[in-house]
Amino acid sequence: MSLGLLGKKLGMTQVNEGESRVAVTIVEAGPCVVIQKKTLEKDGYIALKVGFGDKKAKNMPKAQRVIFENIKMTPKRWIREFRVTEEILAKYEVGQEIKLSDVFQENQIIDVVGTTKGRGFTGVLARWNMKGNRRTHGAHEFFRHGGSIGCRTFPGHVHKNKHMAGHYGVERVTVPNLRIVKILEDKGCLLISGSVPGAGEGFLELKPSKRYHLKAA
């Protein structure tokens, strides 16, 4: 139960750390604004609803547009809820901007959630990393085939979750244990070690790691 941020993947670069270079992903994680406060008495749980990225009001459903009109705020493109404690809930008010340094620190370990790139209809070698058939004498025309999928008379059908060709990508994926190399507060960006799911301009959720506490600098 900790506050996170929403962001947008801008691209990758590298930074120097001592005598080594580290590949980092540039994530625009601000400004994130509090849209609603969920309380235990009214909603049954404690959370902060956070919005990121502006969106035209005409492109939103009326039910959502009215919410932003009531709080006199520009409609947001991405909206997510973060379960928080009562202490964190009391620190923020509706319409308040969440600063990067209030949530994250440099060298902190975080989890990044995003949607992977879409790769269309792919075969079993690309989708499931299968080995493929041998390319020797007598083998022809089925080097990249999936092989047999049948089960004879019993049970007489293909088992569920059988690894076969099909649509690959566009899946919600969490990459755990990435380190915040640097915080650019003035630009609203984070430099995160390694790669994160999705293409450029893709939406991301940034959360404190569930497995590691704050790493000492």
Image (cartoon, rainbow, N blue to C red):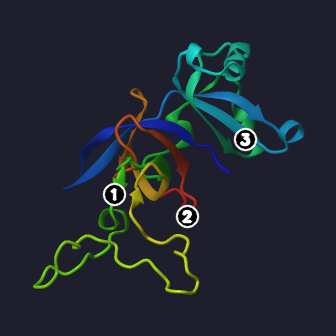
Give above or below for 145 relative to 57.
below
- The quarter of the picture where residue 165 lies is bottom left
Residue sitting at 63 percent across and 16 percent down? Answer: 73
**Nearest to the observer: residue 76 or residue 139:** 139
Identify the mark nearer the N-term, 3 or 2.
3
User: Three-letter amino acid code at disc 1?
Assistant: Thr
Which residue in the protein does label 2 denote? 211
Q: Which residue is under mark 3? A: 47
- Assess disc 1: are there few (<14), some (14-19) or many (≥20) residues with their C-alpha within 10 Å of its C-alpha: some
Calculate the distance from the C-alpha at mark 2 to the C-alpha at mark 1.
34 Å
**Lower sequence index among marks 1 and 3:** 3
Q: Locate the C terminus by quadrant.
A: bottom left
- The type of residue carrying mark 3 is Ala
Q: Tag on residue 175? A: none
Q: Residue at x 70, y 24 (%)?
A: 94
Q: Nearer the viewer, residue 138 or 50?
A: 138
